[in-house]
Image (cartoon, rainbow, N blue to C red):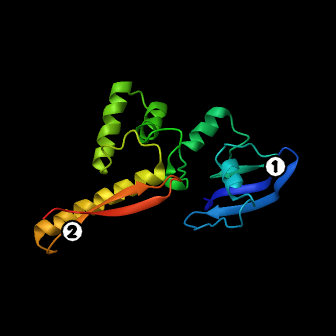
């Protein structure tokens, strides 16, 4: 059995007549750590979009476990995509959707759960990872920060109650300036 898990063969990537990459060939074997690296605008994200079916190549193909992605029937592509996981920058959320909608998306696509059941599963999953109360958040950076600050505050309180620190002097909270820049403030606690 071949250890090749991913093969990109003779791939040409274009936007209209603009060539992004031409005649791209590589393999990724089982257990490999494979890095796609380059300057801004060189085609790293475009390559990934071609590899996961978001953009059809001008020429060439991508193979997963020896099976052609682009020559496959739509049902075959869908089956291959269900075996892939993609983590995007900036929190891995679709920015046009809330956190709850992001978590609900695969449940609606790949299960037979009713809408009410999906809402219940989403609420449970978010609660399990400490994100209850963030269901309607759309800003991944703000979400990550606020969740992190919440965890920090909880740890400070636990340490204070357990005697590991003499005093917790305040709570951290995130604030944003008019340009969306992050400000972190420490609020003093009344004695």
Secondary structure at numbered mark 2: loop
Q: Position of residue 160 (x, y in %)?
A: 15, 68
Q: Within the image, what quadrant is residue 1 found in?
A: bottom right
Residue at which label 2 appears: 169
Kindly identify the residue that appears in the image at 74 percent across and 42 percent down. 56
How many callouts does the rendering have?
2
Check the image and report above or below for 78 versus 153.
Answer: above
**Structural distance between the alpha carbons of marks 1 and 2:** 57 Å
Q: Position of residue 165 (x, y in %)?
A: 16, 74
Q: Position of residue 21 (x, y in %)?
A: 80, 57
Q: Nearer the viewer, residue 90 or 72?
A: 90
Q: Position of residue 124 (x, y in %)?
A: 29, 40
Which of the two discs, 1 and 2, labels the residue nearer the N terminus?
Answer: 1
Residue at which label 1 appears: 14
Kindly identify the residue that appears in the image at 19 percent across and 68 percent down. 168
Q: Nearer the viewer, residue 71 or 167?
A: 167
Kindly identify the residue that appears in the image at 66 percent across and 33 percent down. 74
Kindly identify the residue that appears in the image at 55 percent across and 51 percent down. 86
Secondary structure at numbered mark 1: strand
């Amino acid at each position: 059995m071949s250890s090749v898990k991913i093969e990109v063969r003779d791939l040409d990537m274009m936007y209209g007549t603009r060539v992004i990459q031409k005649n791209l060939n590589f393999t990724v074997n089982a257990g490999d750590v494979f890095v796609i690296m380059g300057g801004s605008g060189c085609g790293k994200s475009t390559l990934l979009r071609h590899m996961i079916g978001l953009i059809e190549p001008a020429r060439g193909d991508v193979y997963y476990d020896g099976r052609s992605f682009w020559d496959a029937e739509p049902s075959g592509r869908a089956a291959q995509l269900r075996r892939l996981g993609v983590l995007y920058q900036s929190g891995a959320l679709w920015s046009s959707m809330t956190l709850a909608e992001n978590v609900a998306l695969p449940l609606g696509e790949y299960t037979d759960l009713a809408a009410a059941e999906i809402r219940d599963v989403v609420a449970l999953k978010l609660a399990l990872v400490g994100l209850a109360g963030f269901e309607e958040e759309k800003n991944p950076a703000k979400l990550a920060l606020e969740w992190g600050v919440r965890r920090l505050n909880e740890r400070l309180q636990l340490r204070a109650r357990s005697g590991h620190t003499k005093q917790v002097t305040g709570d951290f909270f995130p604030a944003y300036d008019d340009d969306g820049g992050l400000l972190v403030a420490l609020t003093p606690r009344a004695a």
